Image: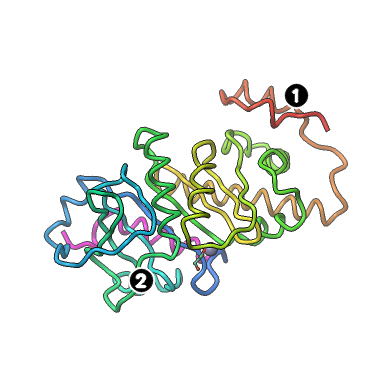
């Protein structure tokens, strides 16, 4: 099968376009990766180039040895993914040591996978282990309302989780584990990848202070939906703070009732009295 005709590639392109339409991907901002299923790779194998040379990932992901990923390209713009996918995204393979990758398809005008490849692959590794292989999508976006909040709220998991949960009734149902926060760090390298993947052991959402967010999920709908929900919560919070703050809210006991009704467990450490 032609690579561009396969369903997972089409789903990936649609999500990149949707993210761009949300205003989350100025210039080359943001990046996105999908851990490809064996049967999906089998269908396109005859169109992949297994002659290309190996490059260093910049970190070690032994639990992703011999896995395949669809990724956005470094310096590429989300707005161009739909127009010329073969120039802006790539299929890569991780070698048997988990230290190197090679490009099997795409980036046909040159280029490398996303500058955040270490964070993407370390997050994939953590999530593959934590979810028994269910999570396949890692998505990084420059979401403006969340970025704004990181200049105002204390950079603590519990504060962000509770503030975001209080903005919309569905929030604690959608991201019941809460959200993690990474202090400002230099992007693109192994250090921020280690910090992010550590938080991904507990959360599906990690906020990068003054930068954006990472979300993890099973498929494109769930992962895009998660980013959208959290960023919308941030937007509501920005408005509430701009209007002078809350005069009434959802209380800890309301959250406990909600958790019972929707069959989710909300950690009591997020339900502190204020
Ligand atoms: O421009 O988003 O974090 C790509 C990025 C780096
Ligand atoms: Zn970024």
Magenta stretch: helix, strand or loop mostly: helix
Q: Residue at x 51, y 42 (%)?
A: 198
Residue 79 falls left or right of residue 210? left
Circle number at residue 245:
none
Q: Residue furthest bottom?
A: 109
Query: Where is residue 251, by image quadrant?
Result: top right
Residue tagged 2: 88
Please say whether residue 4 is one of the residues in the magenta stretch.
yes
How far is disc 1 from disc 2 in space, using C-alphas? 48 Å
SS assignment at label 1:
helix
* Quadrant (top left/top right/bottom left/bottom right) for the N terminus: bottom left
Tag 2: Cα neighbours inside 10 Å, few (<14), some, or many (≥20)? Answer: many
How is this picture coloured? Answer: rainbow
Which numbered mark, 1 or 2, is in the foreground of this view? 2
Q: Residue at x 69, y 44 (%)?
A: 156
- Please, is residue 110 above or below residue 186 in the view? below
Region rendered in magenta: 1-21
Query: Where is residue 161, by image quadrant?
Result: top right
Q: Is mark 2 within 8 Å of ligand 1?
A: no
* Quadrant (top left/top right/bottom left/bottom right) for the C terminus: top right
Q: Position of residue 66 (x, y in %)?
A: 23, 48
Residue tagged 1: 253
Assess whether mark 2 and mark 1 are in contact (beta carbons under 8 angstroms): no
Q: Position of residue 44 (x, y in %)?
A: 17, 57
Q: Residue at x 65, y 61 (%)?
A: 210
Residue toward you, 28 or 240: 28
């Amino acid at each position: 099968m032609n690579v561009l005709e396969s369903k997972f590639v089409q789903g990936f392109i649609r999500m990149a376009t949707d993210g761009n339409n949300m205003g989350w991907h100025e210039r080359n901002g943001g990046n996105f990766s999908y851990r490809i299923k064996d049967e999906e790779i089998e269908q396109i194998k005859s169109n992949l180039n297994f002659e290309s040379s190996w490059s260093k990932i910049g970190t070690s992901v032994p639990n992703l040895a011999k896995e395949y990923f669809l990724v956005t390209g470094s310096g590429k713009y989300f707005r161009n993914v739909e127009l010329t996918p073969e120039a802006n995204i790539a299929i890569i393979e991780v070698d048997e040591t988990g230290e190197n990758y090679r490009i099997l398809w795409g980036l046909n005008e040159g280029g490398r996978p996303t500058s955040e490849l270490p964070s993407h692959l370390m997050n994939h590794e953590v999530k593959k282990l934590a979810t028994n292989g269910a999570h396949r999508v890692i998505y990084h976006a420059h979401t403006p309302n969340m970025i704004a909040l990181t200049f105002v709220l204390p950079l603590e998991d519990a504060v962000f989780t509770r503030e975001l949960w209080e903005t919309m009734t569905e929030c604690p149902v959608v991201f019941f584990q809460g959200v993690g926060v990474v202090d400002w760090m230099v992007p693109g390298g192994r250090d921020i990848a280690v910090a992010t993947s550590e938080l991904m052991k507990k959360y599906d959402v990690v906020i990068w202070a003054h930068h954006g967010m990472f979300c993890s999920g099973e498929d494109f709908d769930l992962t895009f939906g998660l980013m959208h929900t959290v960023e919308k919560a941030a937007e509501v919070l920005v408005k509430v703070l701009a209007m002078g703050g809350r005069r009434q809210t959802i209380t800890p006991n309301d959250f406990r009732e909600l958790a019972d009704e929707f069959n989710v467990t909300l950690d009591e450490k997020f339900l502190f009295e204020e």
